[in-house]
Image: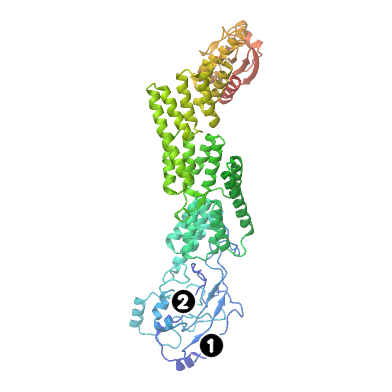
Amino acid sequence: MSDPDHRRKARPTMDLDLLIGRLEVTADKPDSKEPGLGSPVSPLMGQIPEGSASSSTTSSSGSSVTGKSTLSVKKPSDSGDSLKKPTDSGDSESVCTKRQVTGNILCSPDSRRNPVKAAATGLVVGQIPATGNVLPSGNIVPSGKVQPSSGKLQNLRGSRSDVLGSGTGNYGHGSVVRGGRAGGGGETMAGASGHINNVEEVKRKGNEEYRKGNMERALVHYERAIAMAPENAACHGNRAAALAGLGRVWEAVRECEEALRIDPTYLRVHQRLASLHLRLGQVENAWKHLCLAGNPPDSNELRRIQTVERHVNQCADARKVGDWKSALREGDAAIAAGAESCPQLFACRAEALLMLHRPEEADAALSSVQNFELSSTSLSLTKFFGMNGNSYLFFVRSQVDMTLGRFDQAVSAIERASQIDPRSSEIAAMANRARNVVRVRAKGNDLFNMGKFIEACVAYGEGLECDPSNPLLYCNRAACRAKLGQWERAIEDCNQALRFRPKYTKAILRRATYNGELEKWAEAVRDYEILRKELPGDSSVAEALFHAQVALKKSRGEDVHNMKFGGEVEAVSGREQFRAAISLPGVSVVHFKASSNYQCEQISPFVDALCERYPFVNFLKVDINESPAVANAENVRIVPTFKIYKNGCRVKEMICPTEQVLEYSVRHYSL
């Protein structure tokens, strides 16, 4: 190499700005530039492997200098681990894992004509030498050029924001960064090397919280990093990972889309989007991003997508032919296989349950759909079962509301579905059906209130022609027929209502009443016992059950003169009184107590409440100090003790039970 004096003589004077603008470093990926750790005079600077840089040729005139150095840069890791395969973990997104650094002098005609433009795009000045720690031959001003006067230098500094680069370009060989961006990752390098370090520090803290499972805290750090570097694709990818960990899947999808807007070749984000779309049941989108995430695709993810796709297709086929059991099974299998955040599959589950006459369970299944967010605009045209994905949710919601008698909500839901997908024939038919049912139901109610029961029956019948599986219309028509004394036909309508909604308590109560009118006491008792399980605190149901039981026993010729309904807890003082009381038909609950015992005093008010809550149960109390003979005969030594008798036979004994255990036992043996 020529000494500096020889180069000064051979090279013509060249303007500093032109020389600076002719130099550039290009990065192969638009991610944030990773800061280097030192300068060529620092002992911390890592040695470049021998042979990693190609030779360069410099003409004596300085008119052209060509050369290229390829430097493999290992990504700084917060934990010191080696670079890992892209996953959904919260590890810091690699800005780039292998960077090609090219130091071409006079690299293009544009740089010759407009050196300021070339420098403003974030080009780093300097040619990377092939050796390691080499002393500088001129820090900023190239060797051989006379430094400008202090005034000129001051003007230079005032007009430009030139700083020494903090990257891996060798410090001192002209590593000057013009006041733009370097590396395309959105990190401002000019005068902001500390800013980059701050972003990396914030990301590192976010990664630490992510690894600990503190997604909320990790999200806060990632959002701070985005605020500092909004055009950094890695920051958006990290935020997407935290959102996915919190179950905010649609937000995670949008964040990944933003990362891909910045860097369309970001492979790790494509892989993450494939996983997110799979969770949402968006099989086609999952396929697309999986193919872009790498070649060949990840085998595990590929298998998951294939499994979900198979179950979704089989679910659609079963729904098309009305095989609702298979549709329910396949939809649940798709959810279990990975589509656990797909609202359409949960809506399909609700629809299948509704068609299997389990509307309450269908309503519960739809409650989970309310926790999901509607599809983003980019996915709003995705089809499920031949209709728009969002409109399908409202379509099912309308069906469930109609069955449960929430007609106004049903009409509102189907109208929203029509607005989203006005071309769906299935939605249009459902909308017409809902409007007709609401109209004729209102007409029937008005006629019933006016006492026109025959006309009301006709109106409800018109509604059933539109919706032949609506339990509320059957139940209302049963009430009309009961007013007309048509008990048998009224019971038939109740049976139809319960066929489509087996837990419809109003229909069960009406059928029990109508069976009582026909003196079908066994059927009436059966219905009232069902209602007691569904409505344990309803005293009117309890009293109706008691009277039906009395009537049934009487019809069988049993003694019923001592049976009574309700009352207070009866005090028992003698053995004969005790034996007579527990021998009464039905259930008797005996509370053995002592007035001086604290636990007995604590639970006594609850026993009084149970007496009111279960009026058909006979409640007794025995003070063991006042009636020792009864206590000795029943072998009671500890209080409070409860014994339950049924038709004179002891069926249960409890010592110091909790209130919950006591009530459960009373309810169990009284049914």
Q: Residues within 10 Å of mark 1 (few under 14, many from 20)?
A: few
Residue 568 or residue 11, whichever sits in front: 568
Residue 419 or residue 181, whichever sits in front: 419
Q: Residue 124 carries which label?
A: 2
In the image, 141: left or right of 349? left
User: Which colouring convention does the figure follow?
Assistant: rainbow
Give the quadrant of the C terminus.
top right
Is residue 89 visible in this depiction of the protein? no
Give the quadrant of the N terminus.
bottom right
> Residues at badges 2 and 1 in contact (C-beta under 8 Å)?
no
The three-letter code of the residue at mark 2 reads Val
The three-letter code of the residue at mark 1 reads Thr
In the displayed structure, would residue 359 be above or below residue 621?
A: below
> What residue is at 38 percent from the left and 74 percent from the top?
161
> Which quadrant would residue 208 be assigned to in this image?
bottom right
In the displayed structure, would residue 312 be above or below residue 195?
A: above
Q: Look at mark 1 in the image and give the residue it sits on.
A: 57
> What percent of the width, then of the height, locates residue 52?
59, 78
> What percent of the width, then of the height, locates residue 220?
46, 54
Tell me how many marks there are: 2
> What residue is at 62 percent from the left and 57 percent from the top?
302
In the displayed structure, would residue 53 be above or below residue 5?
A: above
Residue 598 or residue 432, whichever sits in front: 432
> What percent of the width, then of the height, locates residue 634?
65, 12
